[in-house]
């Protein structure tokens, strides 16, 4: 762990079971604040499963069971006293496929603040919508058509709208599950640029299949394989000088 | 020689494109299959055309109603202005009929003459005097239906060239009718009475008002019960219920319930609503409750299908920004599923509108001559009214039965059209 960055999220001994099947084995990791951490690994290695533990999205799956502890700022998020609804306001999520609500651009952003009672409709809400869209680099493109449906935007714009929607509830952490896998290279470049800017304010965890993307956007990387966390290191060091043979094989394209 | 230098020779090249026998057979089978399909559609359309055509042809005579017009003298003193409903209007009507046919005097002939006219005439005269008592002492012109035999004679359903023993009117009655036609007292306007009159034993006076109002009340009750209950059940089963044996059992039972013959629901309604709860017999509220039992499975199944069709990404998006389960369903999933739910509901209601068997068992096939004022009054419904009329011996009911079927079909087509429109209008927008 590089010095100067306190751990925002620290997981200890996290295992995940889907029914009888164990998907994640005893994962312990510290994720530093205000950096981008990339989870890499072959399909089915458990990186998305672990990502979804961080905001308890796995709670919505009946047969899913999580053991171990995950703490954000020292507070265990699996504590029975923690309400997952509030947790998800602090830990926003961006999904693989852009999934704006079939509502207007404005309502897409305003929905989160509205249900959390952060702001009432009116100028206060307008401000949140504008700030969120500006931070997501979308404001100039959509400021004249806030009342038009969010589903009418292009794929890349939709994904940035989803990022803006996550930002609107003022989270500490943003989880991104392969946010660029459905986008073309130009839209991908824009989202990557945006991730780099967001790093100043938020702790970002991104799952990606693209080595290049991990190299471009992340400062830290974690390599998962068959449900195990193999290696965590600075991205640069992992890509140039991996410690584990499996990491080396994956990065050089021997499997995956 | 030049062929060989430019690749395979001509014959060989053409062989690539020549369909061999096997390929020909495949294409032939393809064409045959398509022909079977077209033949099936033509057959189905032919059957439908025959059905609708027969109904339309049979119903055609019911489009108009033969009316007769009489000038009736209402002598001063024959009606008490203080109590105009007590007047003997039949006597006045008889007098004016007798004036046109002065030589008819034997009781038998008089009876035969009056058989040509509906007995609704006196009520029409009374209503006219009630509405405007100043008409007492004047001559009032009233136009009222001819009786069934007069109507059928006018429409040519009764063939006057048949020997007298084979038709329901005798030669003298035909002669009287001819006199009336000659005097211009017979007319055949559109038969609005079919829609706006209540039921009657006399086909010329019978109408569908009671049945329409009864069906409306029954469907209203059916909607008010099955829509909220159906949606609540479907949302719980689809979104909240744990997946275990009990919910599997419930699901199987709901699917089976949709296939239960409707007469069984009628028996259930008779046993539970009438005999156990003592609700009023023949009332639309009971009919509506029984129909809602039938409609519930349809609505539940349609709602669950509509909820399933909402992509999981929308649920994830809502949960991802911190919406609770209830908010996710209430704000996003249910509104997106609503078009599908409404389509299913309308189709379920259309089914309920045409349902006859359960209504027969709870007595909605009673003979009731007044439209119900509320859902607790005895009434018929459209399909049971058709059933009653189809069972009646009078000749005039034959065409009226078909006309009533057209009215019922009209409502069904409208409801299905609304369902299709809504499905198109609100098709998935994500």
Image (cartoon, coloured by chain):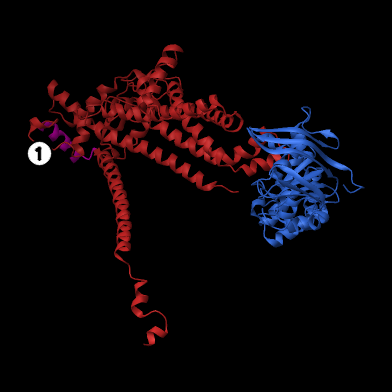
Chain colours: A blue, B red
| Left or right of A254 in this view: B60 | left
Does residue B229 sit above or below B278 in this rendering? Answer: below
Residue A12 position within the rendered picture, expressed as x and y whole percent measured from the top left: 80, 36
Q: Residue furthest bottom?
A: B1
Q: Nearer the viewer, residue B171 or B235?
A: B235
Q: Is residue A169 visible?
A: yes
How crowded pointer 1 is (Cα within 10 Å; few <14, some 14-19, many 20+) is rated as few
Quadrant of the image containing the N terminus of chain B: bottom left
What is the x, y in percent for residue B358?
38, 24
Is residue B206 in view from this perspective? no
- In screen coordinates, is A18 left or right of A11? left
Q: Quadrant of residue B237?
A: top right
User: Looking at this view, is B429 or B391 the one in front?
Assistant: B429
* SS label for mark 1: loop
* In this view, B415 is above or below A178: above
Q: Residue at x 45, y 19 (%)?
A: B376
Number of numbered discs present? Answer: 1
Q: Position of residue A246 (x, y in %)?
A: 73, 51
Identify the residue under disc 1: B161
Taking depth in this image into account, of B92 and B63 the one nearest to the observer is: B63
Q: Residue at x 23, y 38 (%)?
A: B186
Range of magenta residues: B171-185
Q: Is residue B139 above or below residue B335?
A: above
Q: Is residue A101 left or right of residue B357?
A: right
Residue A158 appears left or right of B375: right
- Residue at point 41%, 19% (across, down): B268
Mark 1 belongs to which subunit?
Answer: B
Q: Position of residue A174 (x, y in %)?
A: 78, 45
Asked if residue B176 lies in the magenta stretch, the reply is: yes
Q: Is residue A97 above or below residue A22?
A: below
Front one among B49 and A59:
A59
């Amino acid at each position: 762990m590089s010095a100067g960055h306190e751990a925002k999220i620290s997981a200890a001994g996290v295992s995940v079971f889907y029914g009888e099947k164990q998907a994640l084995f005893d994962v312990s990791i510290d994720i530093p604040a205000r950096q981008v951490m990339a989870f890499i690994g072959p399909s089915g290695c458990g990186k998305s499963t672990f990502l979804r533990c961080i905001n308890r999205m796995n709670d919505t799956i009946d047969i899913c069971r999580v053991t171990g502890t995950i703490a954000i700022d020292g507070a265990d998020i699996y504590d029975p006293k923690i309400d997952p609804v509030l947790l998800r306001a602090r830990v926003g999520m961006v999904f693989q496929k852009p999934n704006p609500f079939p509502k207007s651009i404005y309502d897409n952003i305003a929905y989160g603040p509205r249900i959390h009672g952060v702001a009432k409709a009116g100028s206060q809400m307008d401000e949140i919508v504008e700030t969120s869209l500006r931070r997501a680099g979308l404001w100039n493109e959509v400021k004249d058509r806030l009342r038009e449906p969010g589903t009418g935007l292009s794929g890349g714009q939709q994904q940035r709208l989803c990022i803006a929607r996550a930002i609107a509830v003022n989270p500490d952490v943003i989880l991104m599950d392969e946010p660029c896998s459905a986008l073309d290279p130009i839209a991908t470049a824009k989202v990557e640029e945006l991730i780099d800017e967001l790093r100043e304010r938020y702790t970002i965890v991104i799952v990606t299949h693209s080595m290049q993307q991990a190299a471009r956007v992340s400062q830290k990387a974690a390599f998962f394989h068959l449900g195990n966390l193999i290696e965590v290191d600075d991205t640069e060091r992992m890509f140039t000088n991996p410690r584990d043979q499996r990491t080396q094989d994956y990065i050089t394209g021997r499997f995956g | 020689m030049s062929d060989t230098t430019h690749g395979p020779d001509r014959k060989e090249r053409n062989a690539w494109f020549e369909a061999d026998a096997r390929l020909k057979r495949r294409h032939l089978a393809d064409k045959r299959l398509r022909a079977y399909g077209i033949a099936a559609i033509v057959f189905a359309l032919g059957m439908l055309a025959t059905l609708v055509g027969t109904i339309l042809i049979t119903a055609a005579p019911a489009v108009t109603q033969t009316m007769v017009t009489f000038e009736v003298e209402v002598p001063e003193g024959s009606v008490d202005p203080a109590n105009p409903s007590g007047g003997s209007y039949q006597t006045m009507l008889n007098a004016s009929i007798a004036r046109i046919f002065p030589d008819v005097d034997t009781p038998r002939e008089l009876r035969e003459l009056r058989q040509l006219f509906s007995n609704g005439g006196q009520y029409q005269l009374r209503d006219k005097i009630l509405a405007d008592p100043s008409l007492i002492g004047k001559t009032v012109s009233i136009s009222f239906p001819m009786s069934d035999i007069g109507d059928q004679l006018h429409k040519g359903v009764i063939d006057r060239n048949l020997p007298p023993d084979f038709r329901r009117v005798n030669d003298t009655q035909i002669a009287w009718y001819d006199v009336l036609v000659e005097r211009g007292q017979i007319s055949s306007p559109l038969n609005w009475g079919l829609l706006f009159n209540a039921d009657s034993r006399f086909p010329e006076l019978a109408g569908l008002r009671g049945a329409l109002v009864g069906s409306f009340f029954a469907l209203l009750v059916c909607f008010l019960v099955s829509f909220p209950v159906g949606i609540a059940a479907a949302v719980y089963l689809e979104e909240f219920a744990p997946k275990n044996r009990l919910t599997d059992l419930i699901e199987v039972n709901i699917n089976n319930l949709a296939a239960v013959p409707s007469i069984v629901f009628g028996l259930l309604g008779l046993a539970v609503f009438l005999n156990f709860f003592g609700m009023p017999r023949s009332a639309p509220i009971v009919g509506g409750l029984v129909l809602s039992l039938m409609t519930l499975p349809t609505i539940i199944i349609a709602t669950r299908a509509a909820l399933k069709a909402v992509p999981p990404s929308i649920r994830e998006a809502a949960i991802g920004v911190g919406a609770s389960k209830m908010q996710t369903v209430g704000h996003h999933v249910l509104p997106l599923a609503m078009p599908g739910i409404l389509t299913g509901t309308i189709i379920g209601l259309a089914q309920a509108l045409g349902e006859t068997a359960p209504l027969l068992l709870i007595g909605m096939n009673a003979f009731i001559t007044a439209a119900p004022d509320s859902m607790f009054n005895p009434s018929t419904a459209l399909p049971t009214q058709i059933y009653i009329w189809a069972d009646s011996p009078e000749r005039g009911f034959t065409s009226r039965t078909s006309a009533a079927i057209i009215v019922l079909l009209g409502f069904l087509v409208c409801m299905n059209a609304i369902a299709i429109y809504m499905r198109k209008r609100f098709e998935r927008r994500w």
